[in-house]
Image (cartoon, helix red, strand yellow):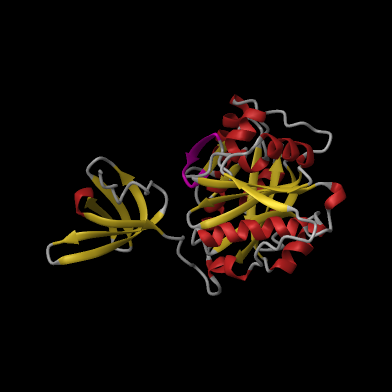
Amino acid sequence: MTESDPVDGLRPGIRAVVRHRIEHGLTDALGDVVALDADTVSVRTRRGVEVIDRAAVVAAKEVPPRSTRRGAPHLAISMDDLERVMVEGWPPLERAELGGWLLRAAAGFTGRANSVLPLGDPGMPLSEAVDHCESWYDERGLRRLFSLFGPEGFAVDDDPLGRHLLGRDYEPFNRTAVLTAATRALPPESPPASGARVRLESAPSPPWWDVYAQLGWPGHPIATPAAARAVLSGSPDQLFASLETGGAVIGVARVAFARMWAGVSAVHVAQDHRRTGAAVQLMGALADASRARGVRTMYLQVAHANSPARSLYDQLGFSTHHEYCYLGA
């Protein structure tokens, strides 16, 4: 049987530790993977980019982004790094880079997959960068949309890009909190006396999809089902949870695993079953699955206007890491 290549699980953009042979033993290269080819793997460490012969690699594994501030790991990650993690948890179908900015498109399915994410410097004057982004979205027939993020309570007009977009008559909307938690602190799944149980699958089953499409946008069918399915199934690894009772699916959720984080999304419970512990049971099943994979940190996004969900996640032990909102024209 052919042995697997220890580098097979790596890809550019992730942070990893690569153990490899040197003249007098073994050493580790810790940092961001910047390139892979048939013969070498390149890792940007604190000492610069280290090019390692693949034949010398004895072990390699992905590690979480480095901490940039004090506190528990789920709070110590920087806003920029967590935003990068979240891209892989809800991946666009098309992406392009403009300096440090990421342009995302997915046939209009959700703002998260169809907006500019400004991570750093675009590499050109602000006005030219915005012009470029507007043309990129115009070419695809998509709304011009930017996602701005900052600390809890940040003001759009405190940001140079935000001020510039407001000057172009962009309108801010849908302020959203990014919440994080340590998976070890989250309660396990606790099936109720009713016998409801959570089924976990690697792909969305027809019942899962039917409930998601119905509950996610009541009265508003998903206009781009192919794009939605591609986004929902596009992470490196994901699970789809269906809460079943009496042969019917009464709630759904999804968890995506990327860069050693678990990202929860698509949590929906049928109206008649809300405030019965259904959402808690779904979250417990996703936490159990995350712990089983050795994933220690979890995130999710919740709209400020969704007070019941905010209260639920607070009770489960989530904390606000940062916030974002959209500016659209």
Q: Verify whether residue 287 appears in magenta.
A: no
- What is the count of numbered marks? 0
The answer to whether residue 171 is left or right of residue 78 is right
Seen as rendered, the residue at the extreme bottom is 70
With respect to residue 186, does 307 lie above or below?
above
Q: Position of residue 134 (x, y in %)?
A: 61, 33
The residue shown at (49%, 37%) is 96
Q: Position of residue 265 (x, y in %)?
A: 66, 49
Q: Position of residue 58 (x, y in %)?
A: 24, 57
The answer to whether residue 51 is left or right of residue 126 is left
In the image, 236 versus 170, the foreground residue is 236
Query: Quadrant location of the C terminus?
Result: top right
In the image, 122 versus 113, the foreground residue is 113
Seen as rendered, the residue at the extreme right is 272
Visible residue check, residue 27: yes
Task: Quadrant for residue 298, please give it.
Answer: bottom right
The answer to whether residue 316 is left or right of residue 101 is right
Task: Quadrant for residue 185, please give it.
Answer: bottom right
With respect to residue 229, does 304 lie above or below?
below
Visible residue check, residue 155: no
Q: Main secondary structure of the magenta part?
A: strand
Query: Quadrant location of the N terminus?
Result: top left
The residue shown at (24%, 52%) is 51
In the image, 116 versus 76, the foreground residue is 76
The answer to whether residue 106 is left or right of residue 259 is right
Seen as rendered, the residue at the extreme left is 23
The residue shown at (71%, 58%) is 281
Q: Which residues are magenta?
A: 93-101
Q: Position of residue 24 (x, y in %)?
A: 13, 67
Q: Verify whether residue 96 appears in magenta.
A: yes
